[in-house]
């Protein structure tokens, strides 16, 4: 079947509901479940119906589960800010960071860092509109310009001016190509494309597949009711986690000190380690252990930004993290995480089929890594 799908260039439409689509209705150990029904489509169909989902419903007295193909209307949503690594190739990038970082901010060290990041974020949005809004079109434009110069150069091989223009056009195309691949790689988050694979079609397919799997158009809520509107889906997850984490247990047994003493506890030695000073080298060491591909926190900045601008920002970053270890206080904007839902199963059906993960800011990650180092 896989060879047939590959030959016909078909992919499986996103599936929800029942994982197994057929069973033989036998009793006891003779009962067999199998996933033999699938909905396949080519890339053109997927582009036309990018919100399609195949919902395999309860089979009832049949051996096959009936399938309902749904296409949902996608409501426009405001995308949060996200730092793209390709921005560091701009000649204006370092100037933007340096100019904003020189501005005076009144407040605690951690507040000063967050305020400067906000200013940089505003300027990076302008930079993106000016030169990085459509990196695919820019790459095509630079490639076309390179080919035109090369055609002229082949007509007059001895023209030194055309030779110089060809070298400049080649450098511009290389940078545009690198920016385009960097954007695709960061958006797709495909680990097997780390070594310069130029298969942009595979990038786009991975991006589309990732976006489809991340969208939730319909789900069974905690009461087992199938909900399909954006508001109902959001409320289903909010209510599920409220019941899970905010419910007070009655007749809860108290924790026994004897049981607690059996596990590790913080002692005076650990407190002393946490109270010791933090150096710039300590922060840089833990910062280098955070991959650039990790999802950013609420501020949108990943570790690549901090590493690239380290010579400019290291003083304020050190003061902010050092202030936390001295005072034990952390700014609310840093001590906050964005919750992302990740499927626990291949085919999702209810709100319980997802697990939440917390996306933390880089400063938060550096603090937690330093605490772990000191305690260990």
Image (tube, rainbow, N blue to C red):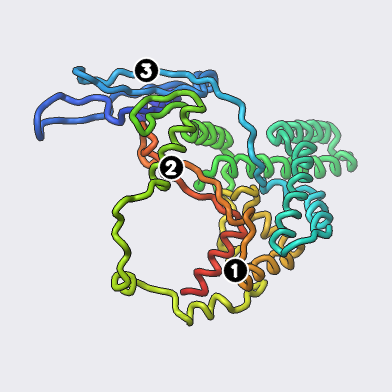
Question: Crowding near pointer 3: few (<14 within 10 Å), some, many (20+)?
Answer: few
* Mark carried by residue 328: 1
**Does residue 149 appear to the left or right of 226 in the view shown?**
right
Q: Earlier in the sequence, mark 1 or mark 3?
A: 3
**Gap in angstroms between the C-alphas marked 2 and 1:** 29 Å
**Gap in angstroms between the C-alphas marked 3 and 2:** 31 Å
- In the rendered image, which residue does mark 3 sit on? 68
Question: Crowding near pointer 1: few (<14 within 10 Å), some, many (20+)?
Answer: few
Where does residue 75 sit, x and y in percent of width and height? 58, 24
Asked if the residue under mark 3 is in contact with the one under mark 1, i.e. CB atoms within 8 Å, the reply is no
The reply to whether residue 294 is visible in this rendering is no
Q: Between tags 3 and 2, which lies in front?
A: 2
In this view, the residue in front, 297 or 253, is 253
Where does residue 164 sit, x and y in percent of width and height? 86, 44
In this view, the residue in front, 28 or 220, is 220
Question: Crowding near pointer 2: few (<14 within 10 Å), some, many (20+)?
Answer: few
The quarter of the displayed image where residue 370 is located:
bottom right
Instruction: Locate the N terminus and report the quarter of the image it occupies.
Output: top left
* Mark carried by residue 242: 2
Q: Earlier in the sequence, mark 3 or mark 2?
A: 3
The reply to whether residue 134 is visible in this rendering is yes
In this view, the residue in front, 142 or 36, is 36
Q: Earlier in the sequence, mark 2 or mark 1?
A: 2
**Gap in angstroms between the C-alphas marked 1 and 3:** 55 Å
């Amino acid at each position: 079947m896989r060879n047939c799908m590959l030959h016909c260039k078909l992919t499986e439409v996103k599936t929800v509901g029942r994982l197994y689509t057929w069973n033989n209705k036998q009793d006891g150990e003779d009962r067999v479940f199998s996933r033999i029904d699938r909905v396949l489509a080519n890339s053109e169909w997927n582009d036309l119906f990018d919100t399609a989902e195949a919902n395999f419903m309860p089979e009832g007295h049949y051996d096959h589960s009936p399938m309902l193909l749904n296409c949902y209307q996608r409501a426009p949503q405001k995308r949060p800010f996200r730092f793209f690594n390709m921005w560091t190739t701009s000649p204006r990038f370092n100037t933007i960071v340096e100019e904003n970082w020189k501005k005076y901010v009144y407040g605690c060290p951690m507040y000063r860092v967050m305020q400067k990041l906000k200013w940089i974020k505003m300027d990076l949005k302008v930079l993106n509109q000016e030169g990085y809004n459509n990196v695919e079109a820019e790459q095509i434009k630079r490639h076309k310009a390179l080919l035109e110069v090369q055609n002229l150069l082949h007509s007059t091989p001895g023209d030194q001016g055309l030779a110089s223009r060809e070298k400049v056009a080649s450098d511009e195309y290389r940078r545009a190509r690198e920016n385009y691949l960097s954007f695709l790689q960061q958006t797709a988050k495909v680990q097997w494309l780390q070594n310069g694979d130029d298969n942009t079609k595979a990038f786009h397919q991975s991006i589309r597949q990732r976006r489809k799997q991340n969208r939730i158009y319909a789900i069974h809520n905690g009461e087992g009711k199938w909900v399909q509107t954006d508001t109902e889906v959001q409320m289903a997850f909010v209510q599920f986690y409220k019941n899970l984490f905010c419910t007070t247990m009655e007749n809860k047994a108290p924790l026994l000190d004897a049981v607690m003493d059996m596990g590790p506890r913080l002692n005076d030695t650990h407190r002393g380690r946490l109270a010791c000073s933090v150096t710039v080298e300590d922060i840089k060491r833990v910062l280098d252990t955070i991959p650039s591909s990790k999802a950013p926190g609420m501020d949108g900045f990943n570790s690549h930004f901090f590493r690239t601008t380290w010579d400019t920002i290291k003083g304020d970053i050190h003061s902010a993290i050092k202030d936390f270890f001295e005072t034990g206080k952390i700014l609310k904007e840093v001590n906050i995480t964005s919750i992302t839902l990740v499927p626990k199963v291949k085919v999702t059906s209810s709100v319980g089929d997802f697990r939440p993960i917390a996306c933390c800011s880089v400063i938060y990650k550096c603090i937690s890594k330093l605490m772990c180092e000191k305690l260990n």
